[in-house]
Amino acid sequence: MKKTGHTFDDDGDDDSIEPSYTPPRPADPSGDLDALARQNLDTTQELKGLARVRQVMKPVSSEDAKTYKKLFVYVKPFLPRIVAAVIMAACAGLLGSYAQLKLVEKGLDTILKGAEASERVDTNEDRVIELKRELERLEKDLASGAVKPGDEAKKTSKLEALSEKREALKLSEEEQAKRKAKLFEIVLMFLAVVLVSAMLGFGQTLIMASATRKIVRRIRDDCFEHLMRLPLRFHQSNHSGKLVARITKDINRLRELLVSMMITGVKESFIFIGALIFAVSQTWIVAAFAVAFVVVAVVPIRIIADKIRNRDREEEAGSGDMFAVLQEALQAQKVIKTFTAEGHETAKFKAITKDINRKQLRTQRLRAWTEPLVELIGGIGIAVGFAFLGGLVLKDELEFAVLATTLFAMQRINASVRKLGKTQNDFAKGITAGERVAKILDQSPEIHEAPDARPLERFEEAIEFNDVVFGYDPNRPVLRGITFTVNRGETVAIVGPSGAGKTSLVDLLPRLYDPSDGSITIDGTDLRDYTLKSLRERIGIVSQETMLFRDTIKQNIAYGLPDIDDHAIVEAARFANAHEFILEKAMGYDTPLGERGGRLSGGEKQRIAIARALLKNPPILILDEATSALDAEAEHRVQEALERLMKGRTTIVIAHRLATITRANRIVVMHRGQILEQGTHHELLAQNGRYAKAYNLQLEAMKRGEREKDIDTFFGDVA
């Protein structure tokens, strides 16, 4: 959407200046072009400077607010613990900064005044020694009889002075002892403050770490659960490798964000506040200096963090591609090796990692600027403060203890700002990961139950498709006007060329998708009026692509049925012609399968899937017949198992083999998303339409000695 007077960057934020601002224009168009260029350059620089300031001062965007709100849902249950930890962090931070600085100030004051007292003690001691010597000389004169007039009075005066000096010396020594005791007391208090601050910090870290782990676990669990509930359309339009990156890498980044904010960020914030309060409490000059330093340090940190966040979005897009390529390459090893495409895949992967490395390097350069920049600003601030405040000390306008503790406070502020700058970088990195996770959680399932949906208890009459229209893209339907009925106990074969819409049609029955128009009913009730769980429990599916899980054979057969007993599993395997080959495995039913059942042959996978469907024992069966890739014996065993599976069930089968098609109660012929013909095998042959022509082409090929092919291939040859 276009906005007059505003420009938007890649992240969608309005970074422009007010629309009322108009760049100055020269009065005379024919004037000095160089001056005009300089003027335009100055204007551009001014605009960029204003934009940077505005970027720092801009409020939280609506996208960020949504992310914070989504994350707060997970933080809320742990608020009591977090509040307790924040209180502990506040106490630890204030004790570690304000209280320690106050004690250092008192200690310095005690030491300086103690030094003065010590100097007085030294002076008194010297005077006492001098008086003692004078008295000794007088006593010698008196003893020798060489008494001079006035010596007796002089002696009395010296004795009085000596007594006074001894008393002063005694007082000075007592004062010095008190100051030493006070200094010792301050040292003990300082150690106690350090110990209490450390213990509180330990408790805060322990509580926050525990809460963070649980929050992240809940986010990951909910994200996975939500992915399981999202419709098939979402999974088909989002690469699984990128979704894996969201669940793993992005949530790990969220954990780093929470740890950084809740542990380092909270504690350092209170250390910063305590040191700032101490600095501000000294004098108004110190207060103004400290506030100016903080403002100068925060602005570049915020600008760098915003840039990191934007570049991190680009970097993560590349990481998602890397996960996607990696997953595809690992899953397609057979194809890669048979096409000798190892070099191609390696080159593709290297190109992606090279691009990611380039983006990471750009981001790292920005991150590398944060600490040195804060260190530089802090160093300049401390140097200027030392020079300015030191001058005041020399003029006796400021006490030395205030100077020393103020410099300590500024050093503490500088260290906290540096750590908070790193936390801000972690926040910028983590919040972009949070946005991506929140986008998954914001996805709403397309398949909804009616408010009064009821369970499908039994299937008794018929399945009806009534003028069904469906398309993956609403503007491009792949099914149009589909109408037919499947009565209970019937087998209906769906045939047609590849791309006719056969799989799309059967995917509508278990509500993997909903039709965009028309309706599908079971026993006269729309599928949307049944609960999803009960509907899908009544339908068994054996798809063309057999999906087995990285688990044992037994667990794969009993998939979705945790309470089933072993006897039922074995019986299902017997009916599916799977029991014999399972017993041949080293661990029998407890044999672990590789990824996607990679340790089994195609026919063995098919029979495991059939056993799974038999064990579920559904009244309705959807079967996508897949036997063309099997050898003759495996095909025979699979076909035999399928016949047992279909017996007594209502079956809709995407049929490829003549035996299956001819045994069906009714055949539905599809072409380009529409039903062209439907009827029994003999009725369709009598109509001499597309089905009859494809059937005849198949018979002619078999007469020439060719092995039976899927009938789909012959529909493509029908005019």
Image (spheres, grey):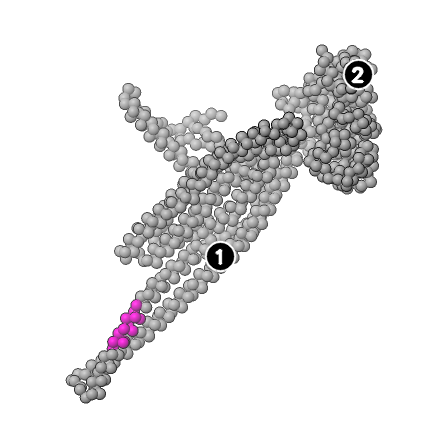
Mark 1 in CB contact with mark 2 (< 8 angstroms): no
Q: Hey, which quadrant is residue 130 in on the image? A: bottom left
- On screen, residue 95 versus residue 74, left or right, reads left
Tell me which amino acid carries mark 1.
Ser
In what element is the residue under mark 1? Answer: helix
Number of labels in the image equals: 2
Tell me which amino acid carries mark 2.
Gly
Residue at (42, 27) in percent of width and height: 5
- The residue where tag 2 is placed is 705
Q: Earlier in the sequence, mark 1 or mark 2?
A: 1
Question: Could you tell me how far apart the alpha carbons at marks 1 and 2 are, in whole angstroms?
Answer: 90 Å
Q: Hey, which quadrant is residue 699 in on the image? A: top right
Residue at (77, 33) in percent of width and height: 608
Depth check, front residue: 714 or 109: 714
Question: Mark 1 or mark 2: which is in front?
Answer: 2
Q: Which residues are magenta?
A: 119-131
